[in-house]
């Protein structure tokens, strides 16, 4: 592995079909599969289904805003400066509760997870939300197992 130094302008931007813009800071290819890092820019209400990553651990650091995480059955608000570590195989989901949130997502090992994200993304900063494509990417890569709908109550 070589030293990686990258400015924000040098990051690859991908629209993730689950909603959000990924700015790839470090790729699996650059770290022989050991780690992948991307910043995710999210809007209020963006949510994930309840899911697991059978082969990767995931770290989420909240750079800005607030998310509500459902991690192994326990809901908890995480604000700017907070961190969530989800070991492989643990059911989890999130929803953005602030107007906007930015998170730094780190996966290890990264090769399968990055393949999932790339399969479920398109170049650019906007696009349609398409959970069908998320499901296809999950099945094709095996990096994510979708267990069910988001476990969050609908706002009144």
Image (spheres, rainbow, N blue to C red):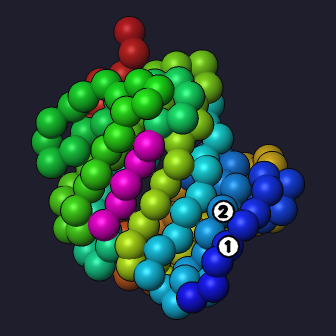
- Compared across the picture, whether 115 is left or right of 152 comes to right
Quarter assignment of residue 88: bottom left
**Where the N terminus falls, by quadrant?**
bottom right
Furthest residue in direction front, as rendered: 3
Q: Which mark is residue 4?
A: 1
- In percent of the image, x 54 and y 56: which residue is there? 131
- Compared across the picture, whether 17 is left or right of 34 comes to right
**Where the C terminus falls, by quadrant?**
top left
- In percent of the image, x 31 and y 36: which residue is there? 69
Residue 115, position as x, y percentages in the image: 55, 80
Residue 153 sits above or below residue 126 on the image: above
* Measured Cα–Cα span from mark 1 to mark 2: 9 Å
Residue 135, position as x, y percentages in the image: 47, 67
Q: Which residues are magenta?
A: 57-61
Is 107 a magenta residue?
no
- Nearest the camera: 96 or 79? 79
Most common SS among magenta residues = strand
- In percent of the image, x 61 and y 50: which residue is there? 39
Quarter assignment of residue 94: top left
The residue to which callout 2 is attached is 25
Q: Mark 1, mark 2: which one is toward the viewer?
A: 1
- Nearest the camera: 81 or 15? 81
* Residue 139 visible somewhere in the drawing: no
């Amino acid at each position: 592995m070589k030293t990686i130094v990258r400015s924000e302008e040098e990051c690859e931007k991908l629209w993730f079909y689950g909603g959000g813009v990924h700015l790839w800071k470090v790729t699996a290819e650059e770290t022989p599969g050991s780690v992948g890092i991307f910043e995710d820019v999210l809007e209020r209400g963006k949510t994930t289904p309840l899911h697991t990553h059978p082969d990767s651990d995931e770290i989420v650091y909240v750079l800005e805003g607030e998310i509500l995480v459902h991690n192994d059955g326990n809901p908890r608000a995480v604000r700017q400066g907070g961190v969530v570590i989800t070991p492989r195989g643990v059911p989890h989901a999130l929803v953005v509760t602030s107007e906007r949130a930015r998170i730094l997502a780190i996966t290890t090992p990264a090769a399968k997870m990055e393949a999932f994200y790339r399969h479920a993304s398109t170049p650019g900063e906007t696009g349609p939300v398409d959970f069908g494509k998320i499901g296809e990417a999950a099945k094709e890569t095996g990096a994510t197992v979708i267990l069910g709908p988001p476990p969050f109550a609908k706002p009144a």
